[in-house]
Image: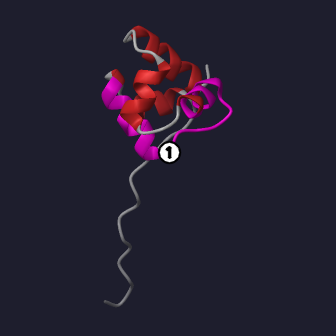
Amino acid sequence: MELGHHLKRAREFKRMSQHEVAELLGIAQKTLSNMESGKTQPSVIQLAKMGEIYGLDVLKLLSENGIHLTPPPPPQKSIGS
């Protein structure tokens, strides 16, 4: 299932309109519609805000959609230091 479809289902579960969520995000309703239909992808900031609005674990949602975020590797020590 696509990320946009999950976001739409989460919005509908919260019984919120696209207009309501778009206003909370500070975007046009059409922009949210495009995200939910998969035409565009939300920015990291928008996705984080949607996670707060919908009560979603964004990292889990991304992982379920094949997007795995990992922490950066620790800095390597140089030899001879």
Position of residue 2 in the picture relative to residue 52 (left or right): right
Q: Residue at x 35, y 28 (%)?
A: 57
Q: Range of the magenta residues?
A: 31-53
Q: Is residue 30 above or below residue 10?
A: below
Give the total number of marks visible in the rendering: 1
- Queried whether the magenta region covers residue 80, the answer comes back as no
Find the residue positioned furthest to the right.
Answer: 39
Disc 1 residue crowd, few under 14, some 14–19, many 20+, Cα 10 Å: few
Q: Front-most of 59 and 76?
A: 59
Q: Residue at x 49, y 23 (%)?
A: 7
Q: Is residue 81 above or below residue 60?
A: below
Position of residue 63 in the picture relative to residue 49 (left or right): right
Point out residue 53 in the picture as x, y percentages from the top left corner: 33, 26
Amino acid type of the residue that numbered disc 1 sits on in the rendered structure? Ser
Q: Quadrant of the N terminus?
A: top right
Mark 1 sits on what residue? 43
Point out residue 10 in the picture as x, y percentages from the top left corner: 44, 16
Judged by its main secondary structure, the magenta piece is helix
Q: Residue at x 49, y 13 (%)?
A: 9
Q: Quadrant of the C terminus?
A: bottom left
Position of residue 55 in the picture relative to residue 29 (left or right): left
Q: Front-most of 30 and 3?
A: 30
Find the residue positioned furthest to the bottom.
Answer: 80
Display coloring? secondary structure
Among the 4 quarters of the image, the one containing residue 50? top left
Point out residue 38 in the picture as x, y percentages from the top left corner: 65, 29
- Queried whether the magenta region covers residue 46, the answer comes back as yes
Point out residue 74 in the picture as x, y percentages from the top left corner: 35, 64
Q: Is residue 10 above or below residue 80?
A: above
Q: Residue at x 47, y 23 (%)?
A: 19
